[in-house]
Each structure stands twice: as C-alpha cells, then as structure tokens.
Amino acid sequence: MHFISEELEDYIEKHSQAEPPLLAQLNKETYQKVLLPRMLSGHFQGRVLSMLSKLIRPKNILEIGTYTGYATLCLCEGMQKDGQLHTIDIKEELVDFQRKYFDLSEWGAQIVQHLGEGTTIIPSLDLKFDLVFIDADKENYLNYYELIVPKMNPGGIILSDNVLWSGKVLDPLVPNDLSTKILLEYNQVLRNDPRVETVLLPIRDGLTVSRVL
C-alpha cells in the first residue's frame, strides 16, 4: 500500500543520501533470487535506519528478522568500532546469502547470526542493547517487546517495523486476522507503556521509534 504517491516516493529517494553500492547489489540479487523481495527494507527506509544508528552510536544492536541482511548492514553503519550486531532469523536457506554480504562489508566480523526462534534466542543473549530493530513475525511482536525491554540500556531505542500493516490498522478487524489484531494491541501497548516514550512515523509501512526511559 502506498501512503503517498509513487512520484513523491521517488522524489524523496532522489533527495536522500544515495544507496551504497553494496546495498544496491544486495537489493538487486534479492529481487532476482529470493521469494517476497518486497520484504526488503530498501533504499529510503535503509537510509533512515542508517541515520538513526549514526545518531544513536550503539555498541550492541539486536535485529529480529534478518531476511537477506539489507537492514542489518544499514544498522551497522552507526555501530561503534568495538560493537556487535546480533541478528535472528528462522530461514536456514538464507544464512549463506546473508553471510556473503556481511563478509563483503566492513562489519562482517561484528555480525553474529542466530538461526531459530526469537522467543528462544533472545533470553539466551547475555547483553544489554542500545538499539533493537523488530521486523519479524507480527504475531510475536508483543512477546519480543516484553523480552527486549529488560535487556535495553537506559535511553536505548527500539524500532518496530510494519506497524501500519498496509493500512489494515484502520480497517474493521477480520476475526481470523491474527497479525492485524496483534499489531493493534502492540501499537496501543507502546503508546501507553510508562517504560518508553514512542513516536510512530509514517515511513514506508510504518516505523515506530520507542526510547527506553
């Protein structure tokens, strides 16, 4: 769903920082070889993630939902030189694809891949995080959030993707549409949770920025 015209989206991209060559290559190969390429963060949202990471200067980053690693590399752009990014995904068939691009980047040695369920892996990580990006199965957003908040440093940022869900958050709820139901609950939780302050940005499919108090 386009919340603004495609022409305006094109103008926005052309007047934002250019897509780095490695990410342009990753973008192209994703569209050539991987199912559901529209899941890719893409040029504009990728530059937003990069800018936020550069402003935050995180030491430890957690990403839930790797896909082909585009957003991963964007988040790494602001990471401290001694930092680490831990990224979690369930798709074993994408691990080698991800690693190829991670190792082509300057952050390959700092990126730790985890294969499996986020609800199992997150509790096993003995780290405090400065930046978290949630972009995985929507049905678990609330579970991920509750696992993540205690692992955040004060002032840490949680980014939540797809929170407008192609505009479905405004439509009458279909009884068996669990993803939309959870996202509606999730958006309300973030709005009311006294542990964070939150702003929902109308970027692409909706990106919430939550700062842990």
Image (tube, rainbow, N blue to C red):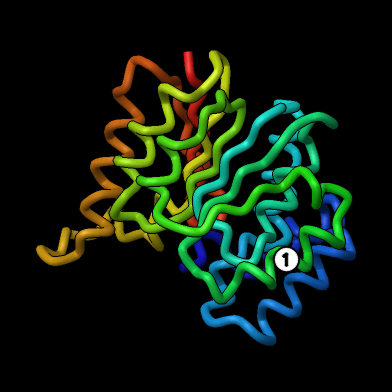
Location of residue 195 in the rendering, given as x and y in whole percent from the top left corner:
38, 16
Location of residue 100 in the rendering, given as x and y in whole percent from the top left corner:
77, 68
Out of 42 and 114, give the one closest to the viewer: 114
Q: Quadrant of residue 81?
A: top right
Q: Quadrant of residue 132?
A: top right
Query: Which amino acid type corresponds to the residue marked 1 in the rendered image?
Result: Asp
Determine the residue positioned at 62% across, 53% down.
113
Looking at the rendered structure, the secondary structure element under dot 1 is helix
Out of 138 and 14, give the one closest to the viewer: 138
Determine the residue positioned at 58% across, 27% down.
129
Location of residue 140 in the rendering, given as x and y in whole percent from the top left corner:
31, 50
Location of residue 174 in the rendering, given as x and y in whole percent from the top left corner:
14, 65
Determine the residue positioned at 27% across, 59% down.
179
Label 1: which residue?
Answer: 10
Determine the residue positioned at 63% across, 36% down.
61
- In the rendered view, would you say 136 is above or below 129? below
